[in-house]
Image (tube, helix red, strand yellow):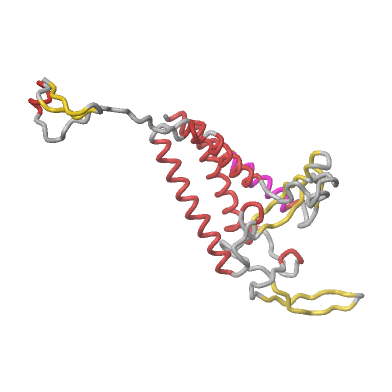
Amino acid sequence: MKNKLTALIVLIVSFLFIDQLIKFGIKINFVEGQSQPLIGNWFVLNYIENPGMAFGTTFGSSIWAKLGLSIFRIIAILGIGYFLWTEYRKDARMEFLVAISLIFIGAIGNLIDSMFYDFLFSFDPCNYYNYMEGTGNFENCVQTIRGQEYSRAVEVRHHGFLLGNVVDMFQFNVQWPNAIPYVGGKQVFPAIWNFADACITSGVVLILIRNKTYFPKEKKINNSLKIPFHITLVQYRKRDFPVRTSRGLITCG
């Protein structure tokens, strides 16, 4: 049991470190919108900042939507952590505990971004990538056009504690063959994701594939003898009572 707990702690801490190391490297060395081949041309680094959940899912652009998303993450992390601990106490399969841990890691990794990145890294409201309609948060930005400076109000994303974006960077650059109707020439999987998203997806897929192993169905015991609950212990020991079977009422004794 202790070795299992140690292994899970090492897994969680090391994977969180990898997730944050990748994100810090991207934030420091890349400009938002910058793209670079990673493995050939089919797997690329494409740095964006995601205001929502895994694979770009959002709840809206208002400050309450952003806070609600962060609070949802916190509640989910507490629930997953509690479930992981209870399954560990039940001495569940290590494979199952690893799957839950991967989901736990991904949720924490993305929450760290939204909690602290607006404080750890400078926020430029006039950066094009921080523009967001529907927030109601306006900033005066100065733009230089043909040597002339112009000031205009632009609507930008909310920023601060629990309001930061999630750093995404990985993308599969693979297109459907042009001969396929409707989807020809389009990307097979256009979403941009990060290491934390990959952890969540891996954990969920592992549970779905192995769910019969993790959640085995209890075998029903077909007991044809139905003993009346009102019999006494003495009668039961002597088998001196009527018993109802599929063939009718018989008397034991």
For this orientation, the residue located farthest to the right is 146
Q: Look at the picture and state if 3 lies above or below 42.
A: above
Q: Is residue 124 magenta?
A: no
Between residues 98 and 153, which one lies in front from this camera angle? 98
Quadrant for residue 31, please give it.
bottom right
The residue depicted at 69 percent of the width and 62 percent of the height is 122
The residue depicted at 74 percent of the width and 50 percent of the height is 190
Image-based side of 163 in relation to 88, left or right: right
Question: Quick one: quadrant of the C terminus?
Answer: top left
The residue depicted at 32 percent of the width and 28 percent of the height is 221
Between residues 250 and 236, which one lies in front from this camera angle? 250
Image-based side of 140 in relation to 249, left or right: right
Q: Position of residue 111 (x, y in %)?
A: 57, 54
Q: Please, what is the dominant secondary structure of the magenta stretch?
A: helix
Q: Which residues are magenta?
A: 15-27
Quadrant for residue 219, please give it.
top left
The residue depicted at 11 percent of the width and 27 percent of the height is 241
